[in-house]
Amino acid sequence: MGFSESLFLFFLLFPLSKIFVAEGLGVNWGMLATHPLPADIVVKLLQDNGFDKVKLFEPDSEALKALGNTGIQVVVGIPNEFLAPLASSVQTAVNWVMQNVSTYISKDGVDIRYVAVGNEPFLKTYKDSYLGTTFPALKNIQAALIKAGLGAQVKVTVPLNADVYQTDNDLPSGGDFRADIHSLLVSIVEFLNDSACPLTINIYPFLSLYADAHFPIDYAFFSGTSSPIVDGVISYTNVFEANYDTLIWALEKNGFPSLSVIVGEIGWPTDGDPNANLDYARRFNQGIFNRIIQGKGTPKRTTPPDIYVFGLIDEDAKSILPGNFERHWGLFNFDGTLKYPLVMGNGRNLVPAKGVNYMARKWCVLSPGANTMDPNFAESVDYACTFSDCTSLGYGSSCGGLDVRSNASYAYNMYYQAANQKIGECQFANLSVLTTTDPSQGTCRYQIMIDVSKHERVRKPTTSAAVREQKTVIVAVLLGLIWIISIML
Ligand SMILES: *[C@@H]1O[C@H](CO)[C@@H](O)[C@H](O)[C@H]1NC(C)=O
Ligand SMILES: *[C@@H]1O[C@H](CO)[C@@H](O)[C@H](O)[C@H]1NC(C)=O
Ligand SMILES: *[C@@H]1O[C@H](CO)[C@@H](O)[C@H](O)[C@H]1NC(C)=O
Ligand SMILES: *[C@@H]1O[C@H](CO)[C@@H](O)[C@H](O)[C@H]1NC(C)=O
């Protein structure tokens, strides 16, 4: 590309990219995948879709470097297992902030705005594991940020699950903190309030539905309900507003009516449960994006919160203890392809990731001649599913309707792809065979995995190509200057 063309493109593209960024579109970037998308592709995906805020669950170095100088605001999370060491000494927190915050800001130009201390540490299922360490860790990280001169720029917060508050009378106005951690929460909230830092809360209407079969399904979405919940003068037509306002009431009741609140996670999965489907996920997430784009608050607090949707891409290595749906929260599939259309800011549609490299188009399937009565059959399918992601095979899931043969093929293929199509990984007791015909049927997609090694290989030449391009531009500028000078002389 010539210099004048670059300049032209620069002036042409720069203002456009500014216009297209919708205000406050946030998303969680989780990385628990066997074949994660390369960080530079994910950052481009964020930019192409107008996301200007991203939340990371840990200070992943590849991700942070790729986010440098993009203008995207970043929340850096601290995993729960670091809470104990961080609680035990300020020096540990000082080191943590130096390595995982300060350096990325000063060296890589990352716009870090928040450090999220722990991740849902007071979840009932964790019992009391983090009750003693969360608040001291929060205070130490805050002290370390101030010491690093980042007190004004980087705020601390604690992302809490919505089960830290409750209501006795089923109405938001009955909201208060959970009795067993009431005084701890008041102390944390007071600290956040005094430090001008926000509280972060994760709200999951899908989980309300998952936990209670009688939950009124239309109350989960944003298009009204025949039986709203009437709380004084307010009629609640969706569970998000009712849940969020329960927290606002709890804060008010304990003396913090104006504490700022971030919605750290909210979303809807697309697979792994009958209610985790494309239609519901599209309805719910479109409703959330519309609220963000319209700057809509709730009846009790009209100022809209910052919202981070969960999540960006599917994560096939997440624990499925909560349910098979855990690996399917992404707005995008594992490879950055679209699941369903969404209208983002300025009426633009969601666009997929670009430049993804895949492994060869070949699938490992049950051999046509194989007998499902073979003594090794059941064991081989179980084995394949033990070492790969079979969460789409369950009841009501995208591949839940397969017959026993296609079911085995799906399992074999997931194993083969997870094993990077290595020779010898499609040998299930002589029952399997390779095919180049895509076995996908109906809603069930037989995947081809991302070629992670190819991405690692191309990264280096790409960098040097970029350097070469920079050099070309510099040479062009110099030649131009020489030319101007020669004319002037
Ligand atoms: C920075 O964060 C990483 C990832 O969580 C962690 O392994 C490392 O120990 C942290 N650095 C310091 C100095 O604490
Ligand atoms: C919360 O912070 C605000 C603003 O700094 C302050 O005016 C208020 O007194 C604080 N509330 C409590 C209960 O500490
Ligand atoms: C498919 O395979 C899984 C994993 O072995 C098994 O749990 C399930 O029952 C199978 N379904 C059918 C229809 O064979
Ligand atoms: C697979 O087939 C080969 C050749 O027919 C045979 O030697 C081998 O024992 C078989 N392996 C299994 C696990 O059945």
Image (cartoon, helix red, strand yellow):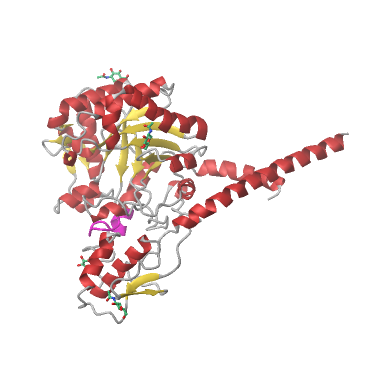
Q: In this view, does 17 lie to the left or right of 35?
A: right
Residue 48 in picture, x, y percent from top left = 49, 49
Q: Is residue 7 left or right of residue 112?
A: right
Q: Which of 224 and 295 is in front in this view?
A: 295
Please report the residue visible at 17 percent of the width from the left and 39 percent of the height from the top.
Answer: 124
Magenta-colored stretch includes residue 280 = yes
Quarter of the image for the C terminus: give it.
top right
- Tell me if residue 411 comes above or below residue 153 in the rendering: below
Residue 364 in picture, x, y percent from top left = 36, 70
- Tell me if residue 405 comes above or below residue 9 in the rendering: below
Specify the segment rendered in magenta: 270-282
Q: Is residue 94 left or right of residue 401?
A: right
Residue 216 in picture, x, y percent from top left = 18, 51
Q: Is residue 52 visible?
A: no
- Tell me if residue 296 comes above or below residue 454 in the rendering: above
Q: Nearer the viewer, residue 295 or 53?
A: 53
Count of numbered circles on the image: 0
Question: Which of the 4 quarters of the picture holds residue 408?
Answer: bottom left
Name the main secondary structure of what is drawn in magenta.
Answer: loop
Furthest residue to the left?
A: 169
Q: Is residue 320 visible?
A: yes
Q: Nearer the viewer, residue 277 or 387?
A: 387
Question: Which of the 4 quarters of the picture holds residue 76?
Answer: top left
